Amino acid sequence: MPDGAAEITGFHAHVYYDSSTRGIAAQLRAELEAGFDVTLGRWRDEPVGPHPKSMYQVAFSPELFGRVVPWLMLNHRELDVLIHPSTDQDVADHSDRALWLGGRLSLNLDFLRNLEAKAQKGPTGSNP
Ligand code: ZN
């Protein structure tokens, strides 16, 4: 197995929408729920974390990648979708390692950099 492949514990697809595409996002969400064993996050109408616009998250196992991602490729309509692996390296997962369908949005990677910096300091924050 190539280096790094074993570190992926799952995948997220983040489906972005706005007020004019929310209905399409709802249709896509219903189809995902009906067709796949995915875990749907709640609607996030306000930007949250690194995400610059409204979205919901779709979490799925590595075993489902070959079914969910091709389906999204054919069915995402005009929605922009970020697909990223979940390892313990959030910044890389959301940048170099990410796939995009539709347009590529500019994520707030500083948010994730700050999280990683905090995690490295540990809970006490006493390490240099
Ligand atoms: Zn994610």
Image: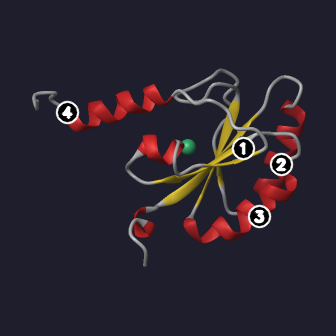
CB-based contact (under 8 Å), mark 3 and mark 2 = no
Q: Quadrant of the N terminus?
A: bottom left
Q: Which residue is mark 1?
A: 81
CB-based contact (under 8 Å), mark 3 and mark 4 = no
| Earlier sequence position, callout 1 versus callout 3 | 3
Q: Which residue is mark 2?
A: 76
Quarter-of-image position of residue 104: top right
The answer to which of 46 and 71 lies nearer the viewer is: 71
The percent coordinates of residue 26 (x first, y second) are: 84, 39
The percent coordinates of residue 93 (x first, y second) are: 49, 48
Say how the picture is coloured.
Answer: secondary structure
CB-based contact (under 8 Å), mark 1 and mark 2 = yes
Label 3 element class: helix
Disc 3 residue type?
A: Pro
Q: Is residue 77 above or below residue 107?
A: below
The percent coordinates of residue 83 (x first, y second) are: 63, 50
The residue lying at 70 percent from left, 24 percent from top is 45
Q: On the picture, is 72 further left or further right than 93?
A: right
